[in-house]
């Protein structure tokens, strides 16, 4: 398979192919995993083709785990990504922001001086909402959305923002559901017990969404892609569904399950989904 070729996903759901070669690379810096200093990395922007999109919607952009810093302006990486995507649209490489929705699958906070940490990511979401048609997404385990319930309420009711946590929204005719956080100790923010998380997945699947946004996604043991086995168990009960997740990085962006369930992992990558030309 050549470096420029497309690998095809043999499923019945929306995504038909994802480019292997990025259409754009965004440099950023992050804390070194060794605990000393910083590392320079690049964020790939990949182009995917989907079977269909509603009239008026030309693209959906999905990303998560932008846990890095803009090397020039020392802002959270998400600010730079929103600007770079707007520039790609202006140059004609991706569709117009006015006809593009954005899906954010959590973890947009980063520190330059140490690994981990939790911080406010409202401004990153707002940077996307200012530029694009709408933003829908979930919180990650490194995210916060203000310090008070009033701040959270104001954020959730911001123009073009659709924060999801056990909710379903309909945008341009697409039913989008989402669960924020991960399975873990409930004494920490954005954690649910395994039982509660699985129950919530079941409830949302009963709502027949077209897209399910999770921060923590399923594993694929056969393909050696890490994730949560219990979440995978629940998703096997779904059908004709696109799951968008992050949290654990995969060497490939996508896997397929039975009954037309596709799982798109956007951890430290951006995927721009556009309609196939007839």
Image (cartoon, rainbow, N blue to C red):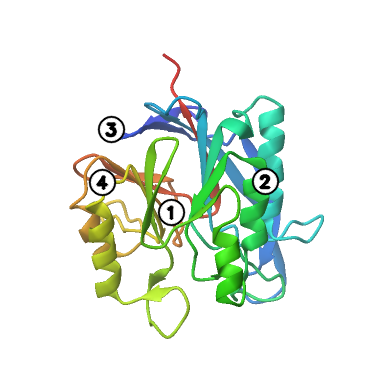
Q: CA distance from mark 4 to mark 3?
A: 22 Å
Q: CA distance from mark 2 to mark 1?
A: 30 Å
Disc assigned to residue 10: 3
- At which x and y percent is residue 138? 47, 59
Disc assigned to residue 239: none
Quadrant housing residue 83: top right
Sequence-earlier tag: 2 or 1: 2
As helix, strand or loop, the secondary structure at mark 1 comes to loop
Quickly name the residue at label 1: 250
Disc assigned to residue 208: 4
Dot 2, how many residues are within 10 Å of its Cα: few (below 14), some (14-19), or many (20+)? some
Dot 4, how many residues are within 10 Å of its Cα: few (below 14), some (14-19), or many (20+)? some
Q: Nearer the viewer, residue 254 or 4?
A: 254
Sequence-earlier tag: 1 or 4: 4
Q: Is residue 2 left or right of residue 122?
A: left
As helix, strand or loop, the secondary structure at mark 4 comes to loop
Dot 1, how many residues are within 10 Å of its Cα: few (below 14), some (14-19), or many (20+)? many
Quadrant housing residue 258: top left
- At which x and y percent is residue 67? 61, 62
Q: Is residue 272 left or right of residue 242?
A: right
- At which x and y percent is residue 201? 28, 60
Instruction: Name the residue furthest bottom.
Output: 187
Instruction: Name the residue furthest right.
Output: 72
Q: Residue at x 67, y 64 (%)?
A: 30
Q: CA distance from mark 3 to mark 1?
A: 19 Å
Q: Residue at x 54, y 63 (%)?
A: 107
> Can the viewer see residue 272?
no
Q: Residue at x 40, y 31 (%)?
A: 17
Sequence-earlier tag: 4 or 2: 2
- At which x and y percent is residue 153? 55, 66
Disc assigned to residue 130: 2
Circle 1 or circle 4, nearest the eye: 4
């Amino acid at each position: 398979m050549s470096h420029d070729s497309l690998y095809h996903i043999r499923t019945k759901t929306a995504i038909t192919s994802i480019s292997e070669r990025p259409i754009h690379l965004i440099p950023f810096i992050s804390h070194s995993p060794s605990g000393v200093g910083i590392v320079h990395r690049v964020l790939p922007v990949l182009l995917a083709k989907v079977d269909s999109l509603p009239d008026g919607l030309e693209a959906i952009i999905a990303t998560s785990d932008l846990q890095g810093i803009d090397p020039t302006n020392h802002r959270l990486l998400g600010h730079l990504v929103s600007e770079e995507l707007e520039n790609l649209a202006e140059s004609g490489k991706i569709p117009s922001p006015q006809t593009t929705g954005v899906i954010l699958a959590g973890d947009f906070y980063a520190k330059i001086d140490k690994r981990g940490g939790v911080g406010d990511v409202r401004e990153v979401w707002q940077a996307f909402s200012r530029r694009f048609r709408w933003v829908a997404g979930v919180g990650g385990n490194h995210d916060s959305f203000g310090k008070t319930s009033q701040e959270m309420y104001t954020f959730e009711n911001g123009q073009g923002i659709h924060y999801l946590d056990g909710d379903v929204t309909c945008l341009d005719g697409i039913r989008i559901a989402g669960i924020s956080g991960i399975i873990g100790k409930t004494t920490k923010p954005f954690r649910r017990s395994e039982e509660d998380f699985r129950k919530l997945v079941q409830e949302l699947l009963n709502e027949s969404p077209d897209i399910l946004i999770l921060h923590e996604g399923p594993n694929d043991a056969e393909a050696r892609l890490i994730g949560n086995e219990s979440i995978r168990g629940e998703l096997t009960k779904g059908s004709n569904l696109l799951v968008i997740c992050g949290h654990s990085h995969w060497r490939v962006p996508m896997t397929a399950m039975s009954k037309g369930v596709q799982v798109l992992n956007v951890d430290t990558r951006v995927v721009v989904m556009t309609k196939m030309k007839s």
